[in-house]
Image (cartoon, rainbow, N blue to C red):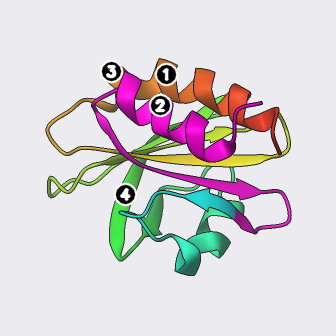
Amino acid sequence: MESLQAIASELIQVDGNIWGVCVVNNSGQIVYQTDNWDLSGDIGAIMGLTEGVGSIELVGIRYVVVENIPERVIGTNVTGKGHVIICPAAGKGKVVCYVKPDASPREAVLNAMNYSRKIGDYL
């Protein structure tokens, strides 16, 4: 059986635009995150993200929400510090992906969504 770490590592290997991954369960606990991205201080923002929210701040960087639908939230930093994609993990939590600054989050969204479903199987 694959581990969350193995699935997250595979996502980063498969999609070179994704540089960081954090998995949060529905209780608001970080189940896994990559070493290069610490979202432990941002759980409230992640779990409190609802429709109509205009922005989210993670690790001190504000991302303007450009898409917020049940399947995903896409945010972009207008000063060029990257993007975030937040996807549900099969109703068991959320997967937050950091997308590198010079990539379009649209290039990574399908991989983020597919791997979020896989991750949900392990929560």
Disc 2 and disc 3: Cα gap in Å? 13 Å
Q: Are marks 1 and 3 in contact (CB under 8 Å)?
A: no
Magenta stretch: give its range: 1-30
Whole-percent x, y for residue 75 in the image? 41, 46
Amino acid type, residue under disc 3 in the picture: Glu
Disc 1 and disc 2: Cα gap in Å? 7 Å
**Could you say which is closer to the camera, residue 100 or residue 64?**
100
Instruction: Tell me the element at label 2.
Output: helix
Task: Work out whether mark 2 precedes mark 4 in sequence or the reverse, and give the earlier one.
Answer: 2
Disc 4 and disc 1: Cα gap in Å? 20 Å
Residue 63 tag number: 4
Q: Tell me if mark 1 has few (under 14), some (14-19) or many (20+) residues whose alpha carbon lies within 10 angstroms of its own.
A: some
Q: Are marks 1 and 2 in contact (CB under 8 Å)?
A: yes
- Residue 8 in the magenta stretch? The answer is yes
Disc 3 and disc 4: Cα gap in Å? 17 Å
Q: Who's the residue at 37% across and 53% down the image? A: 64
Which residue is the site of mark 2? 11
